[in-house]
Image (spheres, rainbow, N blue to C red):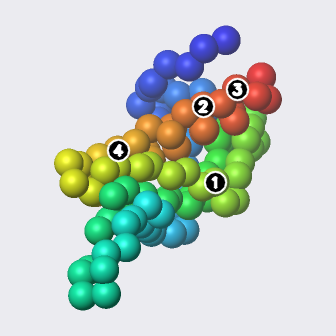
Amino acid sequence: MGLNPAGEGAADAVVSGSILSYELTAPLYRRGQETESVQVLQREVVLTVRVEVLDREAYTILWDNTRLRVVGQYLDASETEENGRTEAIELLVQEIVDGAQSNW
C-alpha cells in the first residue's frame, strides 16, 4: 500500500498537528582568543511537533506522536536558516510517513 497526496475531501487519511517548539541552536562553533568573538560553524533548526494521522472513514487515529522532534542542519558560512528549516520539514514528513506506514 502506498501513499498518494490528495485534497482533504478526497483523502482516506488526514494529517494534522501543531508546532510545540522551534529552536535555533549552534552545536558546532570555534572559540576565538580572549578578544575575538565565537565563530559559529554549524547551526540547527530544531522542530518539535504534535501530529496525528486520522482515518476519515472510521474516524480513528491511525498514528500519532505527541512530541516528534526533528533537526535540520545548515552551515553558518554558506547557508541560511531557510536551508535548515527545509531539511527539518523534509525529515518531519518522512517521520510521519514512516510512522503512519508502520501501522499498515
- The mark nearer the N terminus, 4 or 2, is 4
Q: Residue 79, image x and y in percent?
A: 23, 49
To which quarter of the image does residue 63 belong? Answer: top right
Q: Amino acid at mark 2?
A: Val
Q: Residue 88, image x and y in percent?
A: 44, 47
Above/below status of 38 relative to 19: below
Q: Using residue 86 as the reference point, say whether residue 37 is left or right of it.
A: left
Q: What is the CA distance from the residue labelled 3 to the residue labelled 1?
A: 16 Å
The residue drawn where x is 44% and y is 26% is 6
Q: Amino acid at mark 3?
A: Gln
- The mark nearer the N terminus, 4 or 3, is 4
- The mark nearer the N terminus, 1 or 4, is 1
Q: What is the CA distance from the residue labelled 4 to the residue labelled 2?
A: 17 Å
Q: Amino acid at mark 4?
A: Thr
Q: Which residue is mark 3?
A: 101
The extreme left residue here reads 78
Q: Which residue is mark 2?
A: 97
Q: CB of mark 3 within 8 Å of CB of mark 1?
A: no
Q: Using residue 34 as the reference point, say whether residue 90 is left or right of it.
A: right
Which disc number belongs to residue 86?
4
Q: What is the CA distance from the residue labelled 1 to the residue labelled 4?
A: 16 Å
- For disc 1, the neighbor class at 10 Å (few under 14, some 14 to 19, many from 20) is some
Above/below status of 48 relative to 87: below
Q: Tell which tag, 3 or 1, sits nearer the viewer.
A: 1
Q: Which residue is mark 1?
A: 68
Q: Secondary structure at mark 2?
A: helix
Q: Tell which tag, 4 or 2, sits nearer the viewer.
A: 4
Q: Secondary structure at mark 1?
A: strand
Q: What is the CA distance from the residue labelled 1 to the residue labelled 2?
A: 13 Å
- For disc 4, the neighbor class at 10 Å (few under 14, some 14 to 19, many from 20) is some
Q: CB of mark 4 within 8 Å of CB of mark 2?
A: no
- The mark nearer the N terminus, 1 or 2, is 1
